[in-house]
Amino acid sequence: MDLRFDLGLSFGGAMDEPEYVNAVSNILAAAKKNNDKPVLTFAAGPAACESYYKMGFRILMVGSDSMSLSAHSRQLLQSSHEMMRRVDKEAAAAPK
């Protein structure tokens, strides 16, 4: 995220903004120019992972604990809302 902040980009963006991709490409080019030093980058999902791999990155961070926690929490919340709607619908349809 430090690179994103240095570029004036917000936290949690799509990671595909042209200025970000250009900066990351420049870093990779510099690493290759200097004896192919290993460079790690963050890929926010499968499409970004594929894109960065095709660019030449071989060390990719493909998620984070906060992303996983957020996705799981979103799934739990959604399934809870679906359950509540189902139960309310069943209760409304039940004979009184």
Image (cartoon, rainbow, N blue to C red):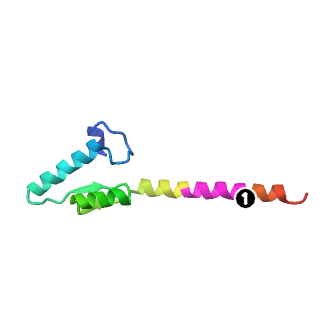
Could you tell me residue 61's position as x and y percent?
Answer: 31, 59
The segment highlighted magenta reads 75-86
Q: Is residue 69 left or right of residue 37?
A: right
The quarter holding residue 85 reads bottom right
Residue 64 makes an appearance in the image: yes
Q: How many marks?
A: 1
Could you tell me residue 2's position as x and y percent?
Answer: 28, 44
Q: Give neighbour class at mark 1: few <14, some 14-19, many 20+ (Cα, 10 Å).
A: few
The quarter holding residue 56 reads bottom left
Residue 61 makes an appearance in the image: no
Could you tell me residue 49's position as x and y percent?
Answer: 32, 59
Q: Quadrant of the C terminus?
A: bottom right
Q: Which residue bears the numbered disc 1?
A: 86
In this rendering, is residue 3 above or below 40?
Answer: above
Q: Secondary structure at mark 1?
A: helix
- Residue at the image point whose x is 89% and y is 60% from the top: 95
Q: Is residue 32 left or right of residue 24?
A: left
